[in-house]
Each structure stands twice: as C-alpha cells, then as structure tokens.
Amino acid sequence: MKDLVETVALALADKPDAVSVRENDDGELITIDVSVATEDLGRVIGKEGRTARALRALASAAGRKRHRRVLVRIAS
C-alpha cells in the first residue's frame, strides 16, 4: 500500500526528496500519511481535490483486496 501511494506522490512532486510516506497498520485500518513540500501540495491534491480523490481510490481498491480499509492523509 505504502509503495503504491509513494510512487504516485513522487511522480507528482517537483521536489521528490521532500516526499515522505508513513504507513500505520491497525488491523482492519491502514493509515497512510503523505507529507510533501508546501509548493507541491497543490499538485498532489489537484484541482478540486481530484488527484487526491484518485489516489485515495487507488489505495482503497488495493486495500479491498486485503479486506482492509485505507485512509490516506495528505499534509505539507
């Protein structure tokens, strides 16, 4: 899960060295925290949140295969 989100975030960011992805697995819920540079925050969230919504949908679909819920949080 973490690798999928990290790959997408790195591809979107202008400063890939500032991208940090942490995963916390609490049984049924997997929380993924994505931290990017302030300048890249808009690129990762996207217009009207479309990119963030798509990223969450990808992570959620991957989580369903493992019968787990996935929460993706994006911060700068």
Image (tube, rainbow, N blue to C red):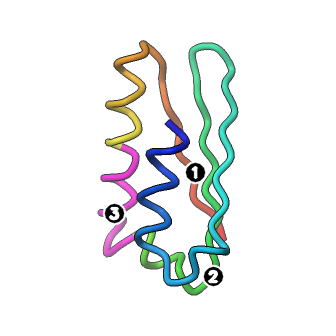
| Residue neighbourhood size for the residue with mark 3, other residues' Cα within 10 Å, grouped as few (<14), some (14–19), many (≥20) | some
Q: Which residues are magenta?
A: 46-56
Q: What amino acid type should be assigned to the residue bearing mark 1?
A: Arg
What whole-number distance in Å separates the C-alpha atoms at marks 3 and 1? 13 Å
Q: Amino acid at mark 3?
A: Thr
Question: Please, what secondary structure does the residue beneath circle 1 have?
Answer: strand
- Residue contact at pointers 1 and 2, CB within 8 angstroms: no
Q: Earlier in the sequence, mark 2 or mark 3?
A: 2
Q: Secondary structure at mark 3?
A: helix
Tell me: residue 52, above or below residue 16: above
Q: Secondary structure at mark 2?
A: helix
Residue 8 falls in image quadrant: bottom left
To which residue does mark 3 refer?
51
Please indicate whether residue 22 sits to the left or right of residue 9 in the image: right
Is 10 positioned to the left or the right of 62 in the image?
right
Give the x, y percent position of residue 25.
66, 25
| Precedes in sequence: disc 1 or disc 2 | 2
Earlier-in-chain disc, 3 versus 1: 3
Q: Residue at x 49, y 76 (%)?
A: 13
| Mark 2: few/some/many CA within 10 Å (<14, 14-19, 20+) | few
Q: Which residue is mark 2?
A: 38
Q: Taking 42 as reference, is 20 left or right?
A: right
According to the picture, the residue beneath numbered tag 1 turns out to be 73
Q: Residue at x 37, y 30 (%)?
A: 62
Residue 34: x and y in percent read 60, 56
Q: Residues within 10 Å of mark 1 (few under 14, many from 20)?
A: some
Circle 2: residue type: Thr
Q: Split into 4 quadrants, where in the image is the C terminus? A: bottom right
Point out residue 10 in the picture as x, y percentages from the top left corner. Answer: 49, 66
Q: CA distance from mark 2 to mark 3?
A: 16 Å
